[in-house]
Amino acid sequence: MGANDSPTTTRSIVTDYFDWRLSNKITTDRLFLIVRKIASDCEATYRSQQPTFNYRLSSAIDLQTLDNIRIIHNEIANELFSDGVITWGRIITFIAYSAVLAEHIIQQLNNNNLSPNLIKSTIIDWTTDFIDSNLQTWLQSQNYWAGCLKFYDKALQRRNSIGRYAGILGTIGVLTLGAFYMRRT
C-alpha cells in the first residue's frame, strides 16, 4: 500500500461499512460516519434512479461460486472507474456497491459451501485490494483517508459558513426592513 501514514486504512474503512451495512455496528469515528452517510445516500439515490443494478445481480450468472461473484465485483469496479476519473465519492460508491453485492449474495445463499462470513470477508478483501492497488497513486496524492476526512470536513465548513452568512444577511435584511417600516410610520 505504500507509505500510508494515516492510522485509518482502506481495510478498516471497508470493513466498517460492511459491518454497519450488514450488522448495524455502532461507531463514533468521524471518518467512518462520513463514509457511512455518503455511501448510504449513494445507495438510496442509485436505487431510486437506476434499478438496473438489482437486475444485473439477479442475472443468469451462478452466484454460488467465488469466481463468479468476483466477475460481478470486477464489473462494478471497472464500470465506476472506466473513464479514469477518481474522486472520494466514486471510491465510497464502490465500497457501497461492494457491500450491496455482499448482502445480495448472502441473501441468495443456497450453497452451504459459501458461508456468509466467507462471502463478506472475501468481498472486503477484493474491495480493499482494488482500491489500494488500482487507486494507490491517487490515494497517496490525497494523503490517503486523512485527505478524505479533510475534504469532507472542508465541505461541511463551507456549508456551515454559507449558512451563517445567509443567517447574518437575513438578520440584516429583517433589521433594514424594520427600520424602513419604522420610518414610514
Image (cartoon, rainbow, N blue to C red):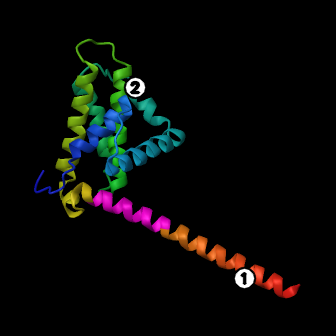
| Residue lying farthest to the bottom in this orientation | 183
Residue 171 point in image, percent of width and height = 65, 74
Magenta segment, principal secondary structure? helix
Please give the name of the residue rendered at 37% of the width and 19% of the height, measured from the top-left corner: 108
In the picture shown, does residue 96 fall above or below 151? Answer: above
Q: Is residue 85 visible?
A: no
Which residue in the protein does label 1 denote?
176
Q: Nearer the viewer, residue 27 or 126?
A: 27
Judge the density around disc 1: few (<14), some (14-19), many (≥20) Cα neighbours within 10 Å.
few
Residue 36 position within the rendered picture, expressed as x and y whole percent measured from the top left: 38, 44
Decide if residue 113 is on the left or right side of residue 95. Answer: left
Number of callouts: 2
Looking at the rendering, the stretch of residues picked out in magenta corresponds to 147-160
Q: Which residue is mark 2?
A: 59
Work out whether 18 lies above or below 183: above
Residue 155 painted magenta: yes
Q: Three-letter amino acid code at disc 1?
A: Thr
Where residue 34 sits in the image (x, y, percent)? 38, 50
Q: Nearer the viewer, residue 44 or 17?
A: 17
Alpha carbon separation for disc pair 1 and 2: 63 Å
Note whether 63 is above or below 123 in the view shown. Answer: above
Q: Residue at x 34, y 22 (%)?
A: 106
Q: Circle 2 — which element?
A: loop
**Residue at image point 41% right, 31% down:** 56
Q: Is residue 53 magenta?
A: no
- Residue 54 is left or right of residue 111, and the answer is right
Inspect this view and state whether residue 92 appears: yes
In front of the other: label 1 or label 2?
Answer: 1
Q: Quadrant of the C terminus?
A: bottom right
Instruction: Kindly indicate the quadrant of the structure image that contains residue 13.
Output: top left
> 78 or 150, which is in the foreground?
150
Give amino acid for label 2: Ser
